Amino acid sequence: MEKVKQESGVTLVILIVSVVVLGILAITAINSGSTGLDTANQQAFISELQMIQAKVNTIYEKRKLSAADKSYYDGIGRNVSGLDQTKLNQALGTTAKEGFKYYTPEDLEKLELNNVTQTVLINYDTREVISYEGIEIADKKYYKLEEMSAYIGRNVQQKTPDTTAEPSFTLEKTKIEEGRWRIIIKNVKYSSERVGLEGIYYKLRSSPNWRMTNKFDIEVTQTGEYEVKVVDTAGKEKIVKIII
């Protein structure tokens, strides 16, 4: 009888330990799944803002070069005066609201930005993009790319005070086949280690409109003199010409 009691006691202890272990594993799995979801949401948030930022950079150039483009883009978006001002101030932080307009996903479609899920505040004159809703990570709310540790880039309007020099680079051309050439951007150098690439733009010299690319090689199908412009995150730019 004593042996049976001992075995029952051991069995009960094993059962209790098993329940505790399973509980710990379940909590770990839940936390792991939650962390994975948070990371995915964070990356999606960053990717969307990066995509919107790239488009705003392009629109910024178009508005400078064309009165028609400026009129078109200025007509899209909504006045921020109609928004919840407390919520607006939370999103803007210390940034002044002058010059900003509010964009819904439907408004962004007019900028050729499809399948964007968030609403944003855009200032074309300063090229700033701010999420209106923001995203919460570890009990903290983020609205701007440069605020987030997972974002390795920087907002294009963050000026670096210790640099005055423009970037430098060289161009090389190769013929792909009849009627197709490649312009290669090489030896890109910046005036400071704190400065990086904001964007690469190119156009035929005879054209009024710049085209933006995120590649260091550009494929073209027209002959003529091309201008390639490299802009850094300090706002400095350099234009180099090449004849195809």
Image: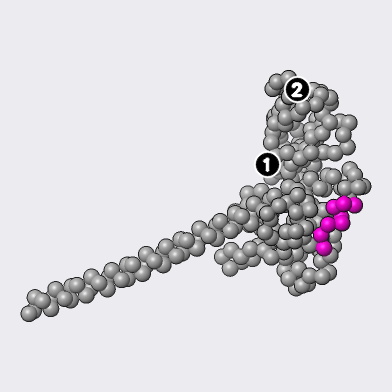
Q: Callout 2 environment at 10 Å: few (<14), some (14 to 19), or many (20+)?
A: few
Q: Write down the quadrant of residue 95 in the picture.
A: bottom right
Q: Position of residue 81 (x, y in %)?
A: 83, 69
Q: Position of residue 76 (x, y in %)?
A: 83, 57
Answer whether labels 1 and 2 touch (C-beta < 8 Å). no
Tag 2 secondary structure: loop
Checking the image for residue 103, the label placed there is none
Q: What is the magenta range?
A: 71-78
**In percent of the image, x 85 and y 39: which residue is there?**
209
Residue lying farthest right?
67
Tag 1 secondary structure: loop
Q: Write down the quadrant of residue 238 in the picture.
A: top right
User: In which quadrant will I find the N terminus?
Assistant: bottom left
Please tell me which residue lies in front, 143 or 104.
Answer: 104
Q: Is residue 74 magenta?
A: yes
| Residue 197 falls left or right of residue 62 | left
Residue lying farthest left?
1
**In percent of the image, x 74 and y 41: which residue is there?**
199
User: In which quadrant will I find the C terminus?
Assistant: top right
Circle 2: residue type: Gly
Look at mark 1 in the image and give the residue it sits on: 193
The label nearer to you, 1 versus 2, is 2
Q: Position of residue 152 (x, y in %)?
A: 63, 49
Q: Is residue 55 magenta?
A: no
Q: Callout 1 environment at 10 Å: few (<14), some (14 to 19), or many (20+)?
A: few
**In percent of the image, x 73 and y 38: which residue is there?**
213
In space, the residues marked 1 and 2 are separated at their CA atoms by 39 Å
Of label 1 and label 2, which has the lower sequence position? 2
Circle 1: residue type: Glu
Checking the image for residue 179, the label placed there is 2
